[in-house]
Amino acid sequence: MSPPASPLAKPPLAGVIRVLPVLLLVPAVLGVYAAMVAVDRASEAAGRARGREYVVRLPLPAAGGQIGLPPIAGPLDASRPLVVIDAGHGGHDPGAGTGAVREKDVTLALAAALRSRLLADGGIRVALTRSDDRYLMLAERAGIARRLNADLFISVHADSAENTAASGATVYTLSDRGSNEAAARLAAAENRADSVNGVRLTEQSDTVSAILVDLSQRETAAKSQDFAQLMLREGAGRLHFRERGLQSAAFVVLKSADLPSVLFEAGYISNPEDEAALTSAEGRDTFASVAARAIRIYFARQLAG
Ligand SMILES: [Zn+2]
């Protein structure tokens, strides 16, 4: 008696038919890509032909692609805490300021000063989202920190107002409303491949995913709040804060469910005293020293807790 035919042993033709759509897809994708490149070149040539020399090229990542990660400085020991400092704006986006002082330059100088201070004191790993005058999309900034597995994210900004009397720094955390949006976004089906605090959401049911995101986000909010308070405490008497020095708002750059984040508005470049502090080596040193102390105390608490 011959053995029954294995259900796996299908005629070879059936296998070819199953693979056929995939085989057809490959040249289709390549074709679309080639067409995009051709259109890009043609529009550039057309721009030149019309005497336009101002074709703006932005370093946007390809669809689904990721920009390169910046280097991490400091101890090689990966168990040391990592802080990612984000200098706001850059490239074609100058940020606030209409005169000679531009926010993008102020933020880069402050970020560099804080990085130097942290590295000089040792023990903490540091990365900058940008170390030169380049444009980064908001989502990329926190994205860099997440991909580096950062423990703390600080986005540095400076403000400007028509009223030159407006002055002082403000520490912002993400508002509740923003937090809920982020939770919804993270729990969305298309983000299932993401992980929160090392737990891969793909392995969880919908309900468990939602609870994990919520718990993680509350913990993240508490940590962000803790760091923001430390900035105020360490800066008291050294930095000039606004009356309400701690506020919350739905900043896109702060919307990470599992990364403690604050946005530091360092002061008003439209105010003469603030501007002097923001653009002087002394003012930068004071900011760097205050922020570095706050960061050190924050990580010490995290390790102790
Ligand atoms: Zn800004």
Image (spheres, helix red, strand yellow):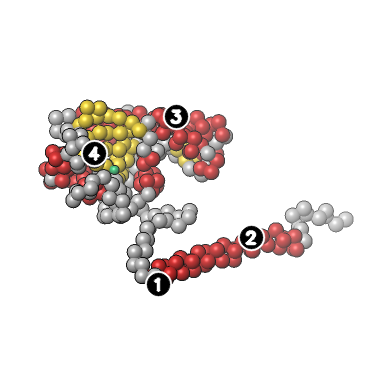
Image quadrant for the C terminus?
Answer: top left
- Residue annotated with mark 2: 22
Whole-Å distance between the Cαs marked 2 and 3? 41 Å
- Residue annotated with mark 1: 49
Asked which quadrant contains residue 294, the reply is top left
Whole-Å distance between the Cαs marked 3 and 4? 38 Å
Disc 1 residue type?
Ala
The residue sitting at the right extreme is: 1
Mark 4 vs 1, N-terminal side: 1
Mark 3 vs 4, N-terminal side: 4
- Residue annotated with mark 4: 161
Q: Is residue 21 left or right of residue 92?
A: right
- Residue annotated with mark 3: 215
Above or below — where is 98 with respect to 60?
above
Mark 1 vs 3, N-terminal side: 1
**Which element is circle 2 on?**
helix
